[in-house]
Image (tube, rainbow, N blue to C red):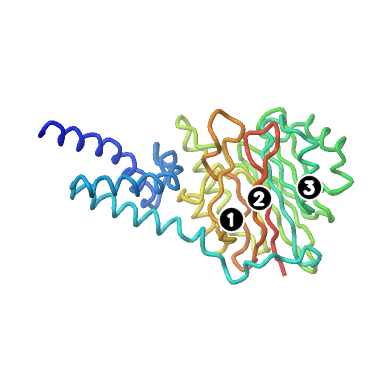
Amino acid sequence: MRFVHGFISSVLWIIAIPLLLIAIARLLPFDGVVPLPHLVAFTPWATLATLPLLIVALFARRKVLAVLLAAALAGYVYWLAPFFVSPSTSSPADPANSGTLRVMTVNVLYGQADAESVVGLVRSQHVEVLSVQELTPAFEEALTDAGLDELLPHSFTVPAESAAGSGLWSATPLSEEEELPGTSFAMPSALVGVGGTDVRVTVVHPHPPMPTDITAWRTELVQLTEHVHADDAPQILAGDFNATYDHAGFRDLLGSRFSDATREWGAGPTVTWPEGRQVPPLFALDHVVVERDMPVSDVVTMQVPGTDHRAVLATVVVE
């Protein structure tokens, strides 16, 4: 009998240790060290796994383990609960209002996404600004052939024969175009007129947090953070951030100025990657980020054939 109790304790601890490590990683104010960014990404899933394990630990009378799991679960609930709290401005915005902007971002996987599907979403979702990552010259041409320029005639693109290309399309003219210097992937931006307000829209795509090169990921997130916070113009950031809300680097970027549209909308967390693989999407790497005083509505994700990312769409109330 003692052997059975010892075996049960060992199994419970083996399952619990990763969940406790994820909670510790999420609690830390930094994540630029392997394996912290990779552990933190599993925070929402660890929340789901911790509750049943806590119940088992209580029934098995493993007091120390139960206390640790309860503390971890409290942290997980605290971090996750705001995604389910709708703001007072959660009613759908009027798309006919000149002060609103329908934004869509999609990573097209080295230009392998179906261009007609992307343009179809732009048309059906009444998208006014489109952010594309991993834009190749061939995919840009495919978008044109599919009729994107008829819907969004103004663009600032930096295509590349790799994952480094990006592009920005708009229904209204762009001005003051610029590109964030010194990054692995292009991050173009431009001012977009929304009603009577010029908003700088930036296509975001920092280096991914590869275990062999975590420095590039952290450095580019910091560089982006410093750049956008130094700009006093109203801003919208849309793209593949290669980070979830649980990453300290992403929250540092938000600071007290910006909000993640998905979290602001309050309809629960979303997942955007990896799409169309052997496993379902697990992580929310793609975001629309807005000024904190910009209400959002109708924040959704959409499947796009041919890419491993879901598109993210949001209606942003600029004024």
Say few, some or many: other residues with alpha carbon within 10 Å of mark 1 (under 14 / 14 to 19 / 20 or more): many
Question: Is 229 on the left or on the right of 315, as rendered?
Answer: left
Q: Is residue 172 above or below residue 90?
A: above
User: Could you say whether the residue bearing mark 3 is in a helix, strand or loop?
Assistant: helix
Residue type marked 2:
Ala
Q: Position of residue 116 (x, y in %)?
A: 80, 36
Residue type marked 3:
Val
User: Gap in Å between the C-alphas at discs 3 and 1?
Assistant: 19 Å
Could you say which is closer to the camera, residue 311 or residue 200? 311
- Look at 61% across and 40% down and name the residue there: 183
Q: Are marks 2 and 3 in contact (CB under 8 Å)?
A: no
Question: Is 42 on the left or on the right of 281, as rendered?
Answer: left
Give the residue pinned by disc 2.
238
Q: Quadrant of residue 49?
A: top left
Q: Position of residue 259 (x, y in %)?
A: 57, 60
Residue 262: assigned label: 1
Say few, some or many: other residues with alpha carbon within 10 Å of mark 3 (under 14 / 14 to 19 / 20 or more): many
Give the residue pinned by disc 3.
122
Residue type marked 1:
Thr
User: Gap in Å between the C-alphas at discs 2 and 3?
Assistant: 15 Å
Could you say which is closer to the camera, residue 293 or residue 118? 118
Question: Is 162 on the left or on the right of 292, as rendered?
Answer: right
